[in-house]
Amino acid sequence: RRRRIEEKVSEIMRGMPSGSDEYEKVKYIYEYLVMHTEYVRGAEDNQNICSVFLSGESVCQGYAKAAQYLFRESGIASVFVSGKVGDGEDHVWNLVRINGAYYHVDTTWGDASYVSGADSGFDGKLPQINYEYLCVPDSQLARTHTLDTIVPVPACNSMEANYYVREGAYFETADMEKVAGLFAGAYEDGTDYVTLKCADRAVYEEMEQRLVEQQQVFRYLQSQDGTVAYTTNAEQLHLSFWL
């Protein structure tokens, strides 16, 4: 099994983005694990990396340990951390260092196969990858996670390598020109959906009012059938639209 894991990891590493951008490496690992692992509570070996690399089915322990293994192989400094979610359920995820700053990465909560079965605040259709938990600071993670404090960990207080910031989808104001560029870029890249992350409740409410209630989203959709599938999340301050 060790040999098979090493072969699988070598295959995964061949797809790693070239260059020294640590964010792109973390993003690749996050996306790979989400796309190639299903959240299955009764999965065999679900407390170790065999479940992820050999069968593609696991729970949070398997996701986080597989992520830790791949971060190490990629030269990304990281630690395996634990805490609570929801009504006190035990949970584990990772902490990574990118360009000297620390961020939380939770591949389990990034997977729609987990989110669809949890009380996540999502209704209806889900993006296949939830980027809400890719390189997030303490302040954002604290909305859904509580970190164990038995062993101190570095503070995560940077947004520089946050997914939404890096991808140009983080809105500190209701900038409609930026919205237009985000939709245009998604169509150009062949992306299935667009997610907008808002910096605070005031921006979120204005964006929801403009794009949903006033239906301004149709200005940016290339489809002309008069319908749009979308989901909103007031707790996490984001809106997703399918193209």
Image (cartoon, rainbow, N blue to C red):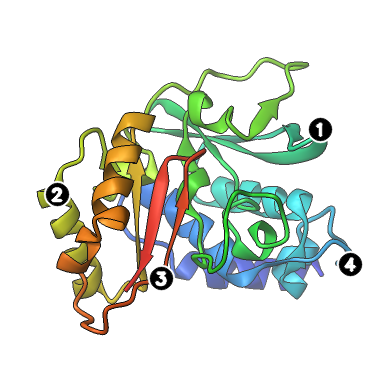
Q: Residues within 10 Å of mark 1 (few under 14, many from 20)?
A: few
- Quarter placement of the N terminus: bottom right
Residue 104, x across and y down, in percent: 54, 35
**Residue that badge 3 annotates:** 229
Depicted 113 relative to depicted 80: above or below = below
Q: Is residue 133 left or right of residue 83?
A: left
CA gap between label 3 and label 2 equals 19 Å
Residue at figure coordinates x 21%, y 35% from the top left: 173
Foreground mark, 4 or 2, reads 2
Foreground mark, 1 or 2, reads 2
Residue type highlighted by circle 3: Ala
Label 1 secondary element: loop
CA gap between label 4 and label 3 equals 36 Å
Residue type highlighted by circle 1: Gly
Q: Nearer the viewer, residue 131 or 9?
A: 131
Residue 44: which numbered mark, if any? 4
Q: Is residue 218 left or right of residue 209?
A: left
Residue type highlighted by circle 2: Met
N-terminal label among 1 and 2: 1
Residue 51, x across and y down, in percent: 79, 65
**Residue that badge 1 annotates:** 88
**Residue that badge 2 annotates:** 176
